[in-house]
C-alpha cells in the first residue's frame, strides 16, 4: 500500500481518496517554497535509483544521521538509503543545537558516516566548530556532508572547506526523488539539459506525477524522442540555469524574475549577492509595485541575523553592512535595475519546515504592510486636505468679517 508520510491526518485521508498513478509507493508533499505544496507520487524504483546513485557517488553505503523532517524528500531519502545499506539511522530530534547534534553524531558506529543538512544548519555548525576545534573533528568524521534545499553561499562553502568538512552540494527536488546533481554533476543515470533557460532533468529517479492534477503533470513532465529516436521523459524544473563545461549552475527560479524598468531581474540572483554581505546572510528579495519602474526589488531582513532560523547569529546587528553598501554592490554586480529602494526589518523571517524562506507568507505579509502604509498615507492626505479646507473656510470667514468691519468702519 502506498505511504503518505506526514503529520496531518486530514491531508493523508484526502490523498488516500485520490486515484494514484500506477506504481505509486510513496506520496510526498513538496516544500511549497514557491506556492501551494503539491503531492508528488514516487515509485519504489525511483526511490531506490536515487539512493543507489548517492551510494555510488559517495563510494559506498553507510549510516545516516537524520536531522531533517522525514515527511520531506530530503529526510525520507535518508531512510531509503539506510534501508538499502542495512544500517540503522540515528535520529536527531528537537531544536537544532550544534553541541547536541555533534554529541549525537558520535553515536554513529558504521565505517562510513553521512548526514544531510540545509544551509541554515550547516551555518550553525560551522559557527560552533570554528570556536571549538575538537568539535570540528567530529564533523570531519562524516564521509560526506550533503547540503541542499537552498543555494549555499560562497563564503559558507569556503568556511566549510577551510575546516576540512567533506561538503557536497545537492540539487534536486521531490519530483526527482531527492538530490540528483551533486556539485554540479549528475549522479546515476540522471541527464540534464537547458531549454529556453530552464533546467530540465531526466532519469530513473523521476516521479510518476502529481496526485489529483493531471494537467500539471502533463505540463511538468514531457516526453520527447532523443537523437536515437528513443522516447525520453523530462521534468521541467522551473529553475533557470546554465551548463558550463558540463557542470550545472542553477541561477534561480524562472518565476522569481521581475521586470523593472523593462529589465529582467532575478530575485534569486539578488539574494545570492546580498547574502555575501556581512549581516545579510538570511536576507530575502521580493518584487514590489512601483509607479515608475513597474516593479522594484525590496529586501526583507531579520533584525538579528539568523533569528528564527535555528541558525546562530553570524553577525551582530552593529556589524551588519550598511544598506547603502548593499545597494552599491548590487549596482556593480547586477546593474541599477537590481538595486532595492528600501529594506524592511522583521523579528524573524517565516520559514518552511525544511528551512527555506516561506516566500508566500512573506509576500502576503509585505502586501498587508504596503496596504497599511497606503491607508496611513491616504488618511494623512485626507487630514491635510481637511486642514486646508478648514483653513480656507476660516480664511474666507475671517476675510468676510474683516470686510464687514471695514465697511462698517468706513460708514461711521
Image (spheres, grey):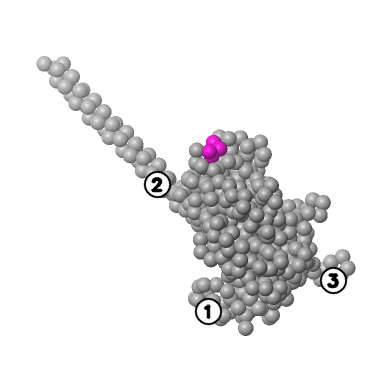
Tell me which residue sits at (73%, 52%) in the image: 249
Sequence-first disc among 3 and 1? 1
Mark 1 element type: helix
When the figure is inspected, residue 141 is found, relative to residue 282, above or below; the finding is: below
Q: Main secondary structure of the magenta part?
A: loop
305 with respect to 153 (left or right): left
Gap in angstroms between the C-alphas marked 2 and 3: 60 Å
Q: Which mark is residue 279?
A: none
Q: Quadrant of the N terminus?
A: bottom right
Q: Quadrant of residue 17?
A: bottom right
201 with respect to 405 (left or right): right
Q: Quadrant of residue 61?
A: bottom right
Residue 91 seen: yes
- Coordinates of residue 395 in the picture (x, y in percent): 26, 28
The residue beneath circle 3 is 230
The 10 Å Cα crowd at callout 3, few under 14, some 14 to 19, many 20 or more, is few
Mark 3 element type: loop
Toward the viewer: 164 or 335? 164
Sequence-first disc among 2 and 3? 3
Q: Which mark is residue 375?
A: 2
Span highlighted in magenta in the image: 319-323
- Coordinates of residue 359 in the picture (x, y in percent): 55, 55
Residue 45 belongs to magenta span: no
Q: How many badges with numbers are in the image?
A: 3
- Coordinates of residue 261 in the picture (x, y in percent): 61, 41
Tell me which residue sits at (42%, 45%) in the image: 373
Q: Which mark is residue 13?
A: 1
The reply to whether callout 3 and callout 1 are in contact (CB within 8 Å) is no
49 with respect to 375 (left or right): right
The 10 Å Cα crowd at callout 1, few under 14, some 14 to 19, many 20 or more, is few
Amino acid at each position: 500500500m502506498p505511504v503518505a508520510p506526514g503529520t496531518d491526518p486530514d491531508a493523508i485521508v484526502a490523498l488516500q481518496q485520490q486515484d494514484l498513478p500506477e506504481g505509486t509507493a510513496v506520496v510526498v508533499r513538496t516544500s511549497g517554497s514557491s506556492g501551494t505544496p503539491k503531492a508528488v507520487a514516487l515509485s519504489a524504483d525511483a526511490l531506490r535509483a536515487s539512493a543507489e546513485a548517492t551510494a555510488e557517488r559517495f563510494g559506498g553505503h553507510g549510516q545516516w544521521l537524520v536531522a531533517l523532517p522525514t515527511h520531506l524528500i530530503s529526510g525520507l531519502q535518508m531512510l531509503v538509503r539506510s534501508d538499502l545499506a542495512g544500517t540503522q539511522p540515528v535520529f536527531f530530534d528537537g531544536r537544532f543545537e550544534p553541541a547536541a547534534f555533534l554529541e549525537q553524531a558520535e553515536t554513529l558506529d558504521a565505517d562510513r558516516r553521512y548526514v544531510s543538512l540545509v544551509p541554515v544548519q550547516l551555518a550553525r555548525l560551522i559557527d560552533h566548530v570554528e570556536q571549538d576545534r575538537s568539535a570540528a573533528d567530529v564533523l570531519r568524521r562524516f564521509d560526506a556532508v550533503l547540503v541542499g534545499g537552498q543555494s549555499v553561499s560562497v563564503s559558507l562553502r569556503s568556511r566549510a572547506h577551510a575546516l576540512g568538512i567533506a561538503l557536497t552540494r545537492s540539487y534536486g527536488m521531490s519530483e526527482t526523488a531527492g538530490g540528483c546533481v551533486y556539485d554540479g554533476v549528475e549522479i546515476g543515470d540522471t541527464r540534464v539539459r537547458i531549454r529556453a533557460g530552464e533546467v530540465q532533468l531526466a532519469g530513473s529517479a523521476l516521479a510518476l506525477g502529481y496526485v489529483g492534477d493531471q494537467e500539471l503533470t502533463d505540463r511538468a513532465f514531457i516526453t520527447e524522442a532523443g537523437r536515437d529516436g528513443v522516447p525520453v521523459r523530462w521534468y521541467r524544473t522551473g529553475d533557470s540555469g546554465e551548463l558550463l563545461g558540463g557542470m550545472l549552475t542553477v541561477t534561480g527560479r524562472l518565476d522569481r524574475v521581475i521586470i523593472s524598468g523593462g529589465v529582467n531581474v532575478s530575485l534569486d540572483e539578488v539574494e545570492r549577492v546580498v547574502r555575501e554581505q556581512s549581516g545579510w546572510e538570511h536576507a530575502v528579495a521580493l518584487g514590489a509595485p512601483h509607479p515608475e519602474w513597474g516593479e522594484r526589488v525590496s529586501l526583507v531582513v531579520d533584525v538579528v541575523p539568523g533569528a528564527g532560523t535555528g541558525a546562530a547569529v553570524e553577525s551582530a546587528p552593529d556589524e551588519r553592512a550598511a544598506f547603502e553598501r548593499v545597494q552599491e554592490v548590487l549596482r556593480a554586480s547586477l546593474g541599477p535595475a537590481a538595486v532595492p529602494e528600501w529594506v524592511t526589518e522583521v523579528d524573524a523571517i517565516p520559514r518552511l519546515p525544511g528551512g527555506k524562506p516561506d516566500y508566500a507568507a512573506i509576500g502576503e505579509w509585505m502586501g498587508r504592510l504596503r496596504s497599511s502604509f497606503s491607508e496611513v498615507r491616504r488618511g494623512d492626505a485626507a487630514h491635510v486636505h481637511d486642514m486646508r479646507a478648514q483653513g480656507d473656510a476660516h480664511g474666507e470667514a475671517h476675510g468676510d468679517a474683516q470686510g464687514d468691519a471695514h465697511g462698517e468702519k468706513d460708514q461711521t
